[in-house]
Amino acid sequence: MSMIDVDKNWRLLIDGEWVEGGAGHYDIVDPHTTDVVGRAPEATVAQANDAAAAARAAFGAWKRLSAKQRCALIGRLGDEIEKRSPDWVATVQAETGATIATTETLQVGGPAVDRFRYYATPIDLDESLSPIPTPAGPLGPAGLLSAEVKRQPVGVVAAITPYNFPVTNVAGKIAPALAAGCTTVIKPAPQDPLGILLLGEAVEAAGLPPGVVNIVNGSGPDVGAALVDSTDVNMISFTGSSPIGAKIMANGGRTMKRLLMELGGKGAAIVTEDADLGTAAQSIATVWGFHAGQICTAPTRVIAHHAVYDQLIETLNTFSGFMKVGDPTDRSTIVGPVITEVHRDRVEQFIASGIDDGARLVCGGDRPDLPGYFIAPTLLADCTPDMHVVREEAFGPVIVVLRYQDDEEAVQLANNSDYGLYSYVFSADTKRAYHIAGQLESGCVGLNVIQPHMEAPFGGFKMSGVGRDRGKWGIEAYSELQSINWMA
């Protein structure tokens, strides 16, 4: 793992050129040490508009390349990321606060490379329709009318990405967008943009034409808002909170932006009386260990059958004792810090509200005596559906548990949420689990498993988002349908 160059002059990528941030720089802070690990460039609104204009100017030539030519460049970008990712680990680990194991396997390389490798193979979604006999009429003579349905790139895509998995998330956006024939402007989260700026260096080394990928950054909302308002931008691909997503939808509507929104979650995990409690508890406990619960698909809302309720809580409490909280660069650490002091304070207030509302604190709830922004893994039992901690997303190492009597009530409790991104069912009876899954208002459901299928469509119901990506659905997300009709 290479050392961090704290004095590196980080710049924006606009139209193939590295340019200074027009509004200066701001500090990027390590959530563990609270040391400054770099000074990120601050773009102006004018620079955001310049990036959108550059993507617009590059769109025509990029679209006209054959799918094979575009995919070759996408594959080359994946190769560059794989080659460079070991040198990115120290920087990305420090800016995200992720544990070293999470950084090496999921923050850089790995899934990001996989996204580019997947879309390096052309995916043809065009379809020819069977001719239909058409009688003579006011619109023309009789004949066989044929049609072809084609996928055309949506245009310029602004990818506004989150802080929890910045490089991996942006790879999941721009790889299918580029494969579809779109050009892009990336707006990273303000807390940890350095890894995405490193990705810009890989874009340059891979030989993508100027303007096809642009990166503009800012510590506040102005840069992202400018992209949402820009008439050069056709689509916003956003991952983040539901309230911000709602604002983007409202503002983007003025220019008819196409939208792909992966928003908040409050994942329900139904645990039946015949479930393997070890498997269920281990899966649920990932909310504590996996990036300190900063993941929207986490099973944070446990709905346990009354017959196993107490045993499951005891098992989860036992698991919490094995989860070392501490220095994320120590390979024995399971739970690292959350991203900022402000976010830590918000999660602590969230926990306090649950206790005030009558939830029983089983473990955690305190601040470990460590430098940085740590929160002890927290388990709240005896929760009720109306509690704030049950209805809203903590985005931290907090699990809430509710009790149910029968499957009908379990489904009702699971669906009693504004969110519907990822839910889970744990049961020894797979037929029963499958039946329950089909009744859940959730874009994705895991049956006795926490890992997602990375080529299955991903997205949410209700306030958890709009649209789907991954696999062939990624190409669909960044394209428009066009029908071409002719008389055979």
Image (cartoon, rainbow, N blue to C red):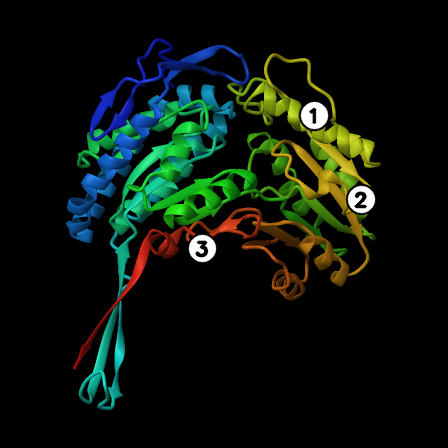
Residue 229 in sight:
yes
Where's residue 370, x and y in %? Answer: 64, 13
- Which marked residue is nearer to the observer: mark 2 or mark 1? 1
Numbered label attached to residue 348 = 1
Location of mark 3 (residue): 456
Gap in angstroms between the C-alphas marked 1 and 3: 35 Å
Q: Earlier in the sequence, mark 1 or mark 3?
A: 1
Residue at 68% x, 13% y: name it: 369
Residue 91 to residue 386: above or below: above
Where's residue 272, x and y in %? Answer: 73, 55
Residue at 47% x, 23% y: name it: 191
Quadrant location of the C terminus? Answer: bottom left
In front of the other: 59 or 36: 59
Gap in angstroms between the C-alphas marked 2 and 3: 34 Å
Residue at 17% x, 80% y: name it: 487
Residue 337 to residue 51: above or below: above
Q: Earlier in the sequence, mark 2 or mark 1?
A: 2
Where's residue 175, x and y in %? Answer: 31, 43
Q: Secondary structure at mark 1?
A: helix
- Which marked residue is nearer to the observer: mark 2 or mark 3? 3
Disc 3 residue type?
Answer: Ala
